Image (cartoon, rainbow, N blue to C red):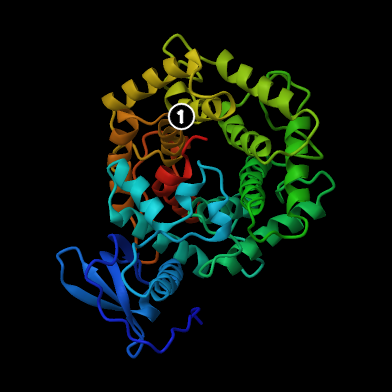
């Protein structure tokens, strides 16, 4: 049953100069721009004035949960004031305590504002909501997502919820988030090393661990600011980070090949594709203020590793376009890691940005020609952290194409990649990457 809230049996007449315009989302993900002017208690509807000045009413039961919360609190302000009041974007108490870089994901208006800033449209946010609804309806009975590599898929989906500002407190998705977190916490407890994967003897286990750990880190960080937490959540994230620190190799990277766990630390081999996921976890661990021995040194080694891989072209990775670990596919993820762990002023970062933006200008993202979602995820993260015209150019193209590829059930059509390793053939993986892309404007702001 959808949550409901009770209104005082009072009919407030339309107020001529009541509020500012905001976007309202109904339960189907459709958006309208209007200002709240009052409440029609008899009809259980919110009274609004549309952008063209005409009045309208929106049935309360059709509103999204965040809009219900907004209307409830705005109505209380109207009653207290006894007349016209200025509308405000109401956030939860926990959201108001978030650090500046996380606040854009906390309210519907803030999220939409970030999307519009980079050339996106209201349809982008509607597509995110539709995708989250789809994830909610397709959650496995054990709390996981996906048919295989469930630790990674569950981690990806939870990142999508947290990227949208949803937590276990969320009226719409709280139960799904709670079950997903419990699945990962249980997986951590069942493994003596705290590894977040059922594939502890396969290369994929290393990827899964980092992706799932990123989700636990998001949950820990949000819980620090007053959100609902879970017993064992902090311990699971700490165990995941400790394993990552212990398994960093002499190159400052991570790789696989181990027997007891998938990692192999006693080697100088490097894998930038794998390492890119680990950079995100290290940044979260530091921001969560965990006191873990070796964390700062691990970050320093990771930064040095990134810089050592820079080519004369400015990218990070191999200089052979036909090779698997090449700079055209991996520079985005590595640059995002460098920005997160060291900031945007590093000379290596500026050189890499020039390479990346030049490459994207020469080969603009095209869903039907070079839809390398894995690569786009890294490009988007790095460019959003950097900001500026390069980010707006990339975002205006990618957000529009991604939203247009969405199916009625919230999933996304498969694009045509020109880099096989950048493809996302698995439906859950593809939907998660697309959702994270659409959330990038408010999910990846630099602290």
Q: Which residue is mark 1?
A: 332
Is 291 situated above or below 13?
Answer: above
Outermost residue toward the front?
82
Is 394 situated above or below 401?
Answer: above
Is 286 situated above or below 196?
Answer: above
How many numbered dots are placed on residues in this image?
1
Q: Quadrant of residue 337?
A: top right
Q: x%, y% of residue 249?
A: 73, 23
Who's the residue at 31% across and 40% down the image? Answer: 118
The front one of 322 and 255 is 255
> Does residue 411 appear in the picture of this structure?
no
| Label 1 environment density (alpha carbons within 10 Å; few <14, some 14–19, many ≥20) | many
Q: x%, y% of residue 128?
A: 40, 57
Who's the residue at 45% across and 65% down the image? Answer: 134
Which element carries disc 1, helix, strand or loop? helix
The front one of 288 and 217 is 288
Q: x%, y% of residue 65?
A: 45, 70
Q: Is residue 405 left or right of residue 71?
A: left
> Does residue 178 appear in the picture of this structure?
yes
The front one of 200 and 300 is 300
Q: Is residue 25 left or right of residue 314?
A: left
Q: Quadrant of residue 13?
A: bottom left
Q: x%, y% of residue 24?
A: 33, 65
Outermost residue toward the top?
312
Is 30 situated above or below 392?
Answer: below
């Amino acid at each position: 049953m959808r949550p409901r809230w009770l209104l005082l049996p009072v009919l407030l007449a339309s107020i001529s100069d009541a509020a500012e315009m905001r976007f309202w989302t109904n339960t189907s993900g459709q958006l309208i721009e209007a200002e709240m002017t009052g409440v029609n208690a008899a009809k259980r509807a919110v009274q609004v004035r549309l952008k063209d000045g005409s009045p309208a009413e929106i049935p309360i039961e059709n509103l999204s949960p965040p809009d219900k919360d907004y209307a409830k609190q705005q109505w209380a302000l109207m009653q207290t004031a006894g007349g016209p009041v200025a509308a405000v974007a109401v956030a939860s108490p926990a959201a108001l305590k978030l650090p500046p870089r996380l606040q854009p994901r906390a309210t519907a208006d803030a999220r939409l504002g970030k999307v519009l800033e980079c050339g996106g449209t209201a349809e982008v946010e509607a597509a995110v909501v539709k995708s989250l609804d789809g994830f909610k309806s397709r959650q496995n009975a054990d709390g996981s997502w996906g048919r295989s590599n469930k630790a990674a898929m569950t981690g990806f989906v939870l990142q999508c919820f947290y990227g949208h500002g949803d937590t276990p407190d969320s009226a719409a998705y709280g139960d799904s988030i709670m079950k997903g977190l419990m699945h990962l916490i249980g997986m951590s407890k069942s493994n003596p090393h705290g590894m977040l994967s059922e594939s502890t003897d396969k290369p994929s286990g290393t990827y899964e661990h980092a992706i799932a750990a990123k989700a636990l880190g998001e949950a820990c960080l949000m819980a620090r600011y007053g959100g609902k937490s879970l017993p064992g959540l902090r311990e699971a994230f700490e165990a995941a980070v400790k394993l990552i620190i212990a398994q960093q190799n002499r190159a400052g990277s991570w790789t696989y090949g181990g027997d007891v766990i998938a990692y192999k630390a006693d080697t100088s081999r490097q894998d930038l594709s794998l390492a890119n996921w680990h950079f995100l976890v290290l940044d979260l661990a530091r921001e969560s203020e965990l006191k873990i021995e070796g964390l700062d040194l691990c970050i320093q080694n990771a930064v040095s590793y990134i810089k050592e891989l820079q080519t004369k072209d400015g990218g990070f990775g191999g200089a052979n376009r036909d090779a698997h670990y090449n700079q055209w596919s991996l520079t985005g993820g590595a640059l995002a890691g460098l920005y997160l762990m060291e900031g945007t002023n590093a000379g290596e970062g500026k050189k890499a940005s020039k390479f990346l933006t030049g490459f994207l200008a020469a080969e603009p993202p095209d869903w039907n020609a070079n839809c390398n979602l894995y690569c786009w995820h890294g490009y988007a993260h790095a460019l959003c952290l950097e900001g500026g015209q390069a980010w707006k150019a990339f975002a205006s193209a990618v957000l529009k194409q991604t939203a247009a590829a969405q199916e009625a059930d919230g999933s996304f059509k498969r694009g045509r990649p020109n880099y096989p390793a950048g493809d996302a053939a698995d439906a859950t993986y593809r939907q998660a990457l697309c959702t994270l892309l659409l959330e990038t404007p408010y999910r990846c702001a630099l602290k």
